[in-house]
Image (cartoon, rainbow, N blue to C red):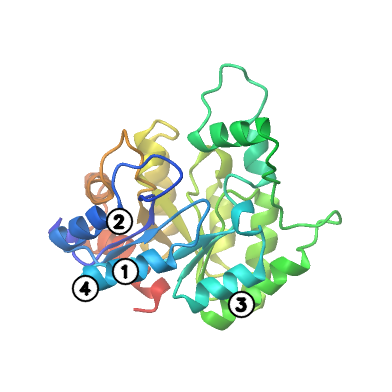
Amino acid sequence: MKLLEGAYDLHVHSAPDVLPRLMDDLEMGERITACKMGGYAIKSHYFCTAERAQLIRQLYPDCDAVGTVTLNSAVGGINPTAVEMAGRAGAKLVWFPTCDNTHERKHVFNGDPNKKLPYWAQILIEMDKEGISAPTVDILDEQGHLTEDTISVLDILAKQNMILATSHLSHEETFALVKEAHTRGVKNIIITHVDFPTTFYAIEEQLELAGYGAVMEHCYTTWATGKVDIATSIAQIKALGPERVIIATDLGQKQSIYPDQGMEAYAQKLLEAGISEEAVRQMCVYNQRMLLGK
């Protein structure tokens, strides 16, 4: 863990949340402080976490908790007002749609009766039975152009110097979004778990996105749960170089390990693959601090 002193995990699912979680923010603050990491980003699919992050920073001064907002239906989808208010409340990271994106919904609800559904999908099924709508959220109009609200959100991100995370968008959406974000002065862009099945980007695609200033996020859970071979992830990381990669965990599920443990496990895999300690720190500490303006 000494190698990870000052590190940030920018993809943590902590409680309180609608979904069951392994730990709450109080426990996470304690763990970050104890292992001398720098901080973590609080991700919720449904709520802005800026207020939670502020309380954790006050309770644990050595834990830089990062507030975020995810543009799913619960906050009105691609809602410029929600993004503006999140930024004013101190949120640093804006996730584009995850479970409510059309691309993600089609992948999860693919008609396979034997498919194991994620917990959020069960919530959607329950809501549908009760007649409660959770509409899909898209960023492109019928002509394939970014919607006006999406453009407005990009301008707010640029104005407030917030981080854009592509989440579970389709490739078509991601490329359109990243190109326009670059044009409009959004300086901090994360391509979310680039080796995840629903968002898998080839190395050539990642290099193209990196040309617009984006960094590629690799998460512990993707290979740890068998969704990708760790060798594939390592190959992508080596091809992009440490200056264009961040390591995160996507942890918080009740059956999993803690995020700080996931960061340590990923760092060990990188070292075993011949990646230098300084490169590991680049991907776990320096790049995250750059994104956060530290």
Bin the neighbour count of mark 3 within 10 Å (Cα to Cα): few under 14, some 14-19, many 20 and up.
Answer: some
As helix, strand or loop, the secondary structure at mark 2 comes to helix
Whether residue 231 is visible: no
Q: Nearer the viewer, mark 3 or mark 1?
A: 1
The residue tagged 4 is 61
Residue at the spot 61% in from the left edge and 17% down from the top edge: 113
Image coordinates for residue 121, horizontal then vertical, percent: 56, 34
The mark nearer the N terminus, 3 or 1, is: 1
As helix, strand or loop, the secondary structure at mark 3 comes to helix
Whether residue 49 is visible: yes
The residue tagged 3 is 156
As helix, strand or loop, the secondary structure at mark 4 comes to loop
Residue placed farthest to the front in the image?
130
| Residue type highlighted by circle 3 | Ile
Residue placed farthest to the bottom in the image?
159
Q: CA distance from mark 3 to mark 1?
A: 24 Å
As helix, strand or loop, the secondary structure at mark 1 comes to helix
Mark number displayed over residue 25: 2
Image coordinates for residue 251, horizontal then vertical, percent: 35, 45
Bin the neighbour count of mark 4 within 10 Å (Cα to Cα): few under 14, some 14-19, many 20 and up.
Answer: few
The mark nearer the N terminus, 3 or 2, is: 2
Mark number displayed over residue 71: none
The residue tagged 1 is 55
Q: CA distance from mark 2 to mark 1?
A: 9 Å
| Residue type highlighted by circle 4 | Pro
Q: How many marks?
A: 4
Residue at the spot 63% in from the left edge and 20% down from the top edge: 112
> In the displayed structure, would residue 239 be above or below residue 128?
below
